[in-house]
């Protein structure tokens, strides 16, 4: 069976005005959802020694993830204070906690590369080791987040040639029929060494380019959107799980959209069960 490892961030999202919170983080959400889709997943990260850190470890252990390289450092677990604009999540203040000094050592790199696929995200602070992991033979994936983020060019340069599958959010800033995102995806493959570059457009679906052709994916309607948090991570989780199961690109886009639709229908960023 194909396996995956997520290397990067973990944090607590807290909705103070609602009295709700949950363990999360880009690689956590992607990893948990992939695991629920039948892919064994390890998480490589560092959490705090506080109550939130203990809750994080307990939650991920309960989900059945491999935490053999999930470290606990003295200090506070990262936390994001969230609000909602109707049913759309809004990120507020962020306390970085022990993630401020997170380091991925040679053993983390070696362990990650033992898996078939290794994924990380823009905020995971793992961009410096993805090249090493890629050179050791693992398939690599990166969530680059918003395509219009002014920090994106620097992140792309830091990971040039190290990423096989790159994901970019175009939600609210374009459609998959526009020439700009298509030119952008071509650039990612041609000049940054990606095998496949993927753009997501929220309710307008998704678009992938593999150096030869474009593939369009339709969004799966969700009649009862509760909270959009986790939509991007769950799309990536569905896509990557499909990839490891041997799906073609159209199938991967479809699997990503199906999972994202399910996740925005619950408050939490993970599907309840699969």
Image (cartoon, rainbow, N blue to C red):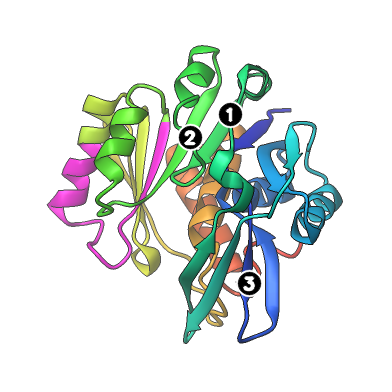
Mark found first going from the N terminus, 2 or 1: 1
Give the image quarter of residue 206: bottom left
Residue at figure coordinates x 56%, y 55% from the top left: 234
Looking at this view, name the residue that lies furthest to the top.
136
Q: Secondary structure at mark 3?
A: strand
Left or right of 90, for residue 169: left
Residue 182 is a magenta residue: yes
Find the distance from the CA under tag 2 to the CA under tag 1: 8 Å
Which mark, residue 14?
3
Q: Position of residue 180 (x, y in %)?
A: 15, 50
* Residue linked to disc 1: 117
Mark 3–mark 2 distance (CA, rounded to whole Å): 28 Å
Q: From the viewer's perspective, tell me whether residue 51 is left or right of residue 240.
A: right
Placement of 263 over or under 72, stated as above or below: below
- Image coordinates of residue 143 in percent, x first then y, are 44, 44
Read off the magenta span. Answer: 165-186
Q: Which residue is mark 2?
A: 141
Provide residue 190's location: percent of width, then percent of height.
Answer: 22, 26
């Amino acid at each position: 069976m194909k396996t995956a490892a997520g290397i990067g961030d973990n944090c607590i999202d807290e909705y103070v005005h609602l009295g709700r919170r949950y363990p999360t983080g880009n690689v956590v959400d992607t990893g948990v959802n992939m695991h629920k889709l039948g892919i064994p997943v390890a998480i490589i990260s560092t959490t705090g020694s506080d109550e939130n850190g203990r809750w994080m470890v307990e939650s991920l252990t309960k989900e059945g993830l491999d935490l053999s390289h999930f470290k606990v450092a003295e200090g506070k677990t990262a936390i994001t204070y969230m609000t909602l604009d109707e049913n759309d999540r809004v990120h507020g203040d962020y306390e970085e906690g022990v993630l401020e000094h997170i380091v991925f050592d040679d053993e983390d790199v070696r362990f990650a590369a033992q898996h078939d696929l290794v994924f990380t995200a823009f905020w995971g602070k793992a961009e410096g080791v993805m090249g090493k992991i890629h050179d050791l033979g693992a398939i690599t994936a990166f969530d680059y987040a918003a395509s219009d983020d002014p920090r994106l060019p620097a992140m792309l340069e830091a990971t040039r040639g190290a990423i096989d599958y790159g994901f970019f959010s175009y939600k609210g800033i374009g459609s998959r029929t526009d020439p700009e995102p298509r030119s952008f995806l071509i650039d990612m493959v041609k000049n940054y060494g990606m095998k496949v570059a993927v753009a997501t457009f929220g309710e307008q679906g998704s678009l992938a380019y593999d150096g030869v052709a474009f593939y369009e994916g339709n969004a799966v309607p969700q009649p009862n959107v509760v909270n959009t948090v986790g939509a991007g991570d769950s799309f990536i989780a569905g896509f990557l799980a499909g990839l490891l199961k041997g799906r073609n690109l159209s199938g991967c886009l479809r699997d990503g959209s199906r999972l994202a639709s399910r996740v925005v229908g619950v408050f939490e960023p993970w599907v309840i069960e699969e």
